[in-house]
Image: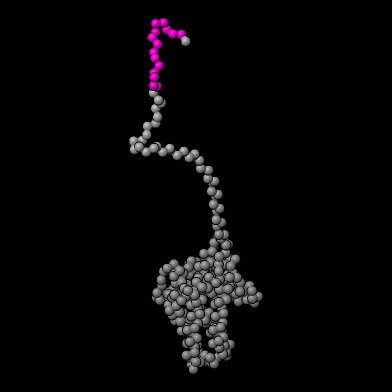
Amino acid sequence: MNKRPGAIPRPAAANPRPAASPRPPASGRPAIAAAPARPVVAPAPRAAAPAAAARPLPALEPDEFSTTEVILDSIRCWLSQLPAYAGVALLLHLPLLLVLLLPPLPGPAVAAIMILAELGIALLVKAALVKAVLDSQRGLSSDFTELLQALRRGPAVLILGVRILGRAFVKLFMLLPGIHYLGETFAAVPALIAEEGSMGEALSRSEKLSAGAVTRVVGVCAVVWTVAFFLTVSAGLHNSESVTLGNLTFLVVYLCARALDTSLAAVLSAITYRHLCDRPGV
């Protein structure tokens, strides 16, 4: 080792300073070794949620007209306004009591008179009740006076009814075409009253509304026809002995039953028209 000349050698320290040891904590307790850090694990990427399958929309039926629904709706509506509807119908049937003043006639003649008179009265009952029924479906009420005022459409309804029955009578010789025509035109009277058009427009409107649903409309018609036929036959009006002053009580009861029947028929006609109007595409 090269030493600088004239330098005085420095003696080595006798007691070298020991290496500094870690200072104990102030409390005197031994230090606790820190827990080894846990390795941070990156969360696994969440799998993308599968796209929710779109719920298939309920397929709209091309024809939602239901005979059962029409009949049930009609009965509910009829029962809700039974006193007013049946009262008007009974009032219109009272002139049939004049048949008691007729001289004795053969049974078929009596039956023909009664049937023709009842057909006309049934049309007048429709004229009186259809608008009230349609209004009730919109939440509007009608009083007894308004029902009678609706009879101002009576002459037009009578003419339309005669027109329909005349054509149906010709077609009924082939049976099925006649029944089909009656089903097509079942909503003509409500269309005439509700839309206030001409008779031709009412017939065209009814045929358009019932297109594709004539068979089901005939099912509604069958209820009306069955009840009317049952009442007529069970009353024995084809027998001239039934229409006498001695059977006045029986005839009054019969007219009350017919008032119920024709008022229900009018409600069925109006509700059928409303349901046909609610069909898509009409």
Give the total of numbered labels.
0
Q: Is residue 244 above or below residue 14?
A: below
Work out which residue is located at the far right of the displayed protein and give it.
174
274 and 203: which one is in front? 274
Residue drawn 44% across the image and 75% down it? 80
Work out which residue is located at the far front of the displayed protein and give it.
14
27 and 46: which one is in front? 27
Work out which residue is located at the far bottom of the displayed protein and give it.
246
Image-quadrant location for residue 164: bottom right
Residue 31 appearing in the image? yes
71 sits to left or right of 148? right
Give the x, y percent position of residue 220: 55, 73
Give the x, y percent position of residue 121: 50, 79
Give the x, y percent position of residue 155: 48, 75
Give the x, y percent position of residue 188: 53, 70
The residue segment tinted magenta is 2-16
20 and 95: which one is in front? 20
Q: Is residue 42 above or below residue 227?
A: above
56 sits to left or right of 134? right
Residue drawn 47% across the image and 87% down it? 252
Image-quadrant location for residue 175: bottom right
Magenta region, mostly helix, strand or loop? loop
Residue drawn 48% across the image and 81% down it? 259
158 sits to left or right of 179? left
Residue 267 appearing in the image? no
Q: Is residue 271 above or below residue 89?
A: above
Residue drawn 41% across the image and 71% down it? 141
13 and 67: which one is in front? 13
